[in-house]
Each structure stands twice: as structure tokens, then as C-alpha cells.
């Protein structure tokens, strides 16, 4: 008989102890469909090539992910939608980390800022449960721009300075502690 391995928290819950905390998934439930229906375990909501751009020392700390772009494509076809959100447990809290995989050239900065502004507006209007989990720990990045190819954004360019002022700057990989 196949027996599934349980984490310590899940075992305690089974014995009548603490209930496993699922803050990311519960926040999605508060938002409702179509966003809640996009939930996947770990990094499964990220496309296969994009999963390789994100790493974590302990995969059990990745509590789930959503493909926000796909989830909202039908309802908001012309919006500059952000790609993904992942749930990540760091310390005693669970955090939402927002990831956009996009070209990283000087000509893409304004487009990325439009996407970031749209995401922040969406979080304030429809995604408040996830907004409360975003940017609450300096060790966990809130908004991440992952370069989809070559990084071509000179650090002293006007566009690079603008991106940094907005709190985003492209990187090749996201490594979570």
C-alpha cells in the first residue's frame, strides 16, 4: 500500500493539533474565480522554461503559484497583465512574490512599469488578500522582473534609473532564501 509522506505540521493536524497554514491558497479563495481556480502546487503554474528561473533552498517553502496572466486573459484581454504570483513561506509568515518574465532591454522599461502599475491597481482593487501578503519582509522580494533573454539594460541609463525608482530591475534568476 502506498503511503503518502506528511510534513510535521500536516501530521500534527491529522492528530488533532494545529491546522496546516495555507495563507496563499486561502487568500486566493477570498479573491475567487478565475484567480482562485489558477492555483497550482509549488511552481507548477509557471511555464516549464520559466520554472527554471526560480529556485529555493527548500522547495517545501513554495506554497503554490498562479498564472495571473492566463487567469485574467478572458476578463481583461487588453490589460497589461502581470505573469505570475508564488506563495513563499519565510520565517513565520507566508508571502506573495510577483514574477514577470519579460525582455530586459531599455525599450521594455516603460512597458514593465505599465505592467507593475496595473498589478498594483489590481491588488488594491480585486487582490487585497494577496496585497496583504506582498512586500511585508525585506528579505523576500515583492515584484520581480526576470529577463526572458539577454539582459541589455545599462545600469547607468535613464531607463535603468527609472526602473530602480519604481522598485524593479531585471535579473536572470530568482533565488529565494
Image: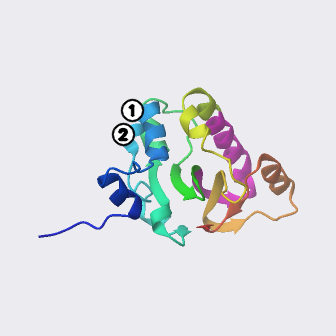
The extreme front residue here reads 16
Point 54% across, 73% down: residue:
57
Question: In the image, which disc is placed on residue 37?
Answer: 2
Q: Position of residue 28 (x, y in %)?
A: 45, 39
Up the image or down, 66 lies above or below 79; here it is: below
**Pointer 1: residues within 10 angstroms few (<14), some, or many (20+)?**
few
Q: Give the range drawn in magenta.
A: 97-120
User: Which quadrant is home to the N terminus?
Assistant: bottom left
Separation of marks 1 and 2 at Cα, in angstroms: 6 Å
At x 65%, y 37%, the residue is 120
Residue 162 is marked as none
Res 33 label: 1
| Residue 59 percent location from the top left of the image | 47, 67
Q: Do the residues labelled 1 and 2 touch (CB within 8 Å)?
A: yes
Q: Is residue 95 left or right of residue 16?
A: right
* Other residues around mark 2 within 10 Å, as few (<14) / some (14–19) / many (≥20): few
- Extreme residue toward the bottom, this view: 57
Number of numbered labels in the structure image = 2
98 part of magenta stretch: yes
Q: With 143 as the anchor, is 53 left or right in this view?
A: left
Amino acid at each position: 500500500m502506498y503511503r503518502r509522506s506528511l510534513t510535521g505540521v500536516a501530521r500534527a493536524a491529522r492528530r488533532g493539533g494545529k491546522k496546516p497554514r495555507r495563507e496563499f491558497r486561502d487568500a486566493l479563495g477570498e479573491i475567487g474565480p478565475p484567480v482562485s481556480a489558477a492555483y497550482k502546487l509549488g511552481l507548477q503554474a509557471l511555464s516549464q522554461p520559466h520554472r527554471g528561473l526560480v529556485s529555493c533552498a527548500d522547495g517545501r517553502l513554495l506554497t503554490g503559484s498562479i498564472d495571473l496572466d492566463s487567469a485574467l486573459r478572458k476578463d481583461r484581454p487588453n490589460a497589461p497583465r502581470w505573469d505570475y504570483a508564488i506563495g513563499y513561506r519565510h520565517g513565520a509568515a507566508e508571502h506573495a512574490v510577483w514574477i514577470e518574465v519579460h525582455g530586459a532591454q531599455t525599450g521594455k522599461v516603460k512597458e514593465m512599469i505599465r505592467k507593475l502599475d496595473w498589478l498594483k491597481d489590481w491588488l488594491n482593487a480585486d487582490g487585497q488578500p494577496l496585497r496583504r501578503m506582498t512586500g511585508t519582509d525585506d528579505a523576500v522580494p515583492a515584484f520581480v522582473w526576470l529577463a526572458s533573454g539577454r539582459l541589455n539594460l545599462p545600469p547607468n541609463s535613464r531607463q535603468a534609473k527609472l526602473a530602480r525608482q519604481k522598485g524593479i530591475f531585471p535579473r536572470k534568476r530568482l533565488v529565494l532564501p
